Image (tube, rainbow, N blue to C red):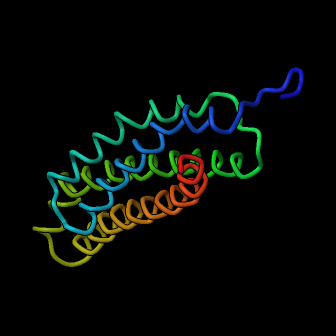
Amino acid sequence: MELFSNSVNDGVWVTQVEQAFYRVAAVMREVKNPCVDGEPERLVRAVQGALSQLPASEAAMKGPDPSQPRAKAAKKALRNAIKDSRHAAKQGQNFIRDITGGGGERMRNETGFAQRVAGARVTFSLNGMKELAESASKKLDEASVFIGASRA
C-alpha cells in the first residue's frame, strides 16, 4: 500500500462488503419474484424490506477502495447494483401507490380513455420496477464473479 493511499487489501475489502452484497442479492430476489408471481402482499413486503435494508448496504460501500482493478470493477458493479435496487424499490412503491390508489380504481371501474391512461401508468410503473430489478441483478452477477472467486 502506498503512502497516503485510500485502498485496502482485496481480501479485507471483500470481508467489508460481503454482507452488503448478500443483503442486496436477497432483496433483489424478493423484489423480482413477486413481479413474476403477481402476489401483491409479497411485493409490498419486498419493497418495504428493500427500502429498509438498502441504506446499510450503501453505508458499507463508503469504505476504502480495493487495490486491484478487478476488485475496483466489482466495487463499481456492486455500488451500481445497490443504486438500481434502490430505484427499483422506489418504482415498486410507485406501482403499489398507482394500483391501490386512483389509478387502479380508474383501471378497474372506468371505461375508455381514462381506463387506458390509468392502465398505461400502472404498467409503466411495473415495467420500470422489473427493468431496474433485472439491471441490478446483472450488476450483482458482475460483482459476484470477483467476490465469489476471492472467497473460494
**Residue depicted at 84% across the width and 26% down the height:** 5
Residue at the bottom extreme, as displayed:
112
Q: Which x, y percent locates residue 112?
A: 21, 78
Q: Which x, y percent locates residue 98?
A: 26, 55
Which quarter shows the N terminus?
A: top right
Quick check: 49 left or right of 139? left
> In the image shown, does 145 or 97 lie closer to the viewer?
145
Q: Which x, y percent locates residue 71?
A: 69, 47
- Quadrant in which residue 19 is drawn: top left
**Residue depicted at 31% across the width and 48% down the height:** 93
Residue at the top extreme, as displayed:
4
Residue 110 in the image: above or below residue 19? below
Residue at the front extreme, as displayed:
152
Residue at the right extreme, as displayed:
3
Quick check: 34 left or right of 32? left
Quick check: 27 left or right of 142? left
**Residue depicted at 21% across the width and 48% down the height:** 44
Residue 97 in the image: above or below residue 8? below
Count of labels in the image: 0
Residue 43 in the image: above or below residue 134? above
> In the image shown, does 125 or 65 lie closer to the viewer?
65
Residue 43 in the image: above or below residue 11? below
Q: Which x, y percent locates residue 111?
A: 16, 76
> In the image shown, does 45 or 71 lie closer to the viewer?
71
**Residue depicted at 20% across the width and 54% down the height:** 102
